[in-house]
Image (cartoon, helix red, strand yellow):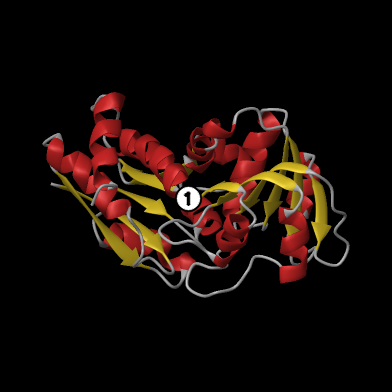
């Protein structure tokens, strides 16, 4: 029996166990998936091996710490320095990133997106912005301060702090911060959020399972929005393929994982 988990702080809200256990149960794959509350990201590697895990997903705020913990990083994760999926491969920790492709799956319903504003500058923002740039989408990043914006400037994004933000029109605004996850905070001051949402066609929030204060404002303004559930589903399918070493058919994983969202 293989054991998998999700690491995060907080982590009690995570739907990942329902999603992956639904796949394991319906496809008779001998594995189980649980949650691990990890306040200190520097303890990730030792916690992973002490629990005898075969693999894990990483959520906020440890995706960059997960990158540092890996013995080897593969694919898109190597490009962005952010890991959300890890596996034990012959005693070595191997890291991947499935967030970006999961998000692209989620926004397909919006059609052609050419101009995106990203709120926040953490691990999720890094992965998404790098993926947007790959698709030749114009990207603007807005963060509380200038501290974490160097990476995004080098990537080719327009970057602003709350103090020097220059408003323009956007096809899509994405909240990648944890604001609203366990409180009623907004990802930026209310006045700024109001102006931004008056100048966008679509809104997305990486947080799922609740209508955040950010999404409530979008709803009041009759803006089409999605929460993080579709992104979660997309990245979850890709992560499960990695966990099971591609032994299961992709369509079977999709079908079984989608059933978990009915629970």
Residues packed near mark 1 inside 10 Å, few (<14), some (14 to 19) or many (20 plus): many
Q: Is residue 250 visible?
A: yes
The structure residue drawn at horizontal position 54% and vertical position 31%, both measured from the top left corner, is 108
How far across and how far down the image is residue 141, in percent?
74, 51
Closer to us: 168 or 219: 219
How far across and how far down the image is residue 234, in percent?
42, 38
The structure residue drawn at horizontal position 72% and vertical position 28%, both measured from the top left corner, is 136
Residue 185 vertical placement versus 46 (above, below): below
Where is mark 1, residue-wise?
Answer: 228
From the viewer's perspective, is 193 left or right of 4? Answer: right
The structure residue drawn at horizontal position 49% and vertical position 38%, both measured from the top left corner, is 106
From the viewer's perspective, is 169 left or right of 62? Answer: right
From the viewer's perspective, is 194 left or right of 262? Answer: right
Secondary structure at badge 1 equals: loop
The structure residue drawn at horizontal position 38% and vertical position 51%, both measured from the top left corner, is 57
How far across and how far down the image is residue 259, in percent?
24, 41
From the viewer's perspective, is 162 left or right of 211? Answer: right
């Amino acid at each position: 029996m293989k054991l998998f988990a999700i690491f995060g702080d907080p982590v009690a809200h995570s739907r990942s166990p329902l999603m992956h256990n639904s796949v394991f149960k319906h496809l008779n794959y001998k594995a189980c998936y649980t949650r691990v509350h990890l306040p200190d990201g520097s303890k990730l590697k030792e916690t992973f091996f002490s629990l005898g895990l075969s693999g894990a997903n990483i959520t906020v705020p440890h995706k960059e710490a997960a990158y540092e913990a890996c013995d080897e990083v593969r694919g898109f994760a190597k490009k962005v320095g952010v890991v959300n999926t890890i596996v034990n491969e012959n005693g070595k920790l191997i890291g991947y990133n499935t967030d970006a492709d999961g998000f692209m799956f989620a926004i397909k319903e919006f059609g052609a997106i050419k101009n995106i504003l990203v709120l926040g500058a953490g691990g999720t923002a890094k992965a998404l912005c790098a993926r947007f740039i790959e698709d030749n989408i114009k990207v603007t990043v807005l963060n509380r301060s200038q501290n974490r914006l160097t990476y995004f400037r080098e990537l080719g994004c327009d970057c602003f702090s709350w103090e020097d933000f220059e408003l323009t029109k956007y096809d899509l605004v994405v909240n990648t911060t944890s604001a609203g996850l366990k409180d009623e905070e907004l990802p930026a001051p209310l006045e700024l959020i109001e102006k931004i949402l008056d100048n966008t066609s679509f809104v997305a929030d990486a947080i799922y399972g609740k209508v955040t204060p950010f999404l409530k404002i979008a709803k009041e303004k009759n803006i089409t929005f999605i929460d993080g559930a579709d992104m979660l589903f997309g990245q979850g399918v890709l992560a499960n393929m990695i966990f099971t070493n591609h032994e299961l058919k992709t369509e079977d994983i999709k079908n079984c994982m989608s059933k978990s969202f009915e629970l």
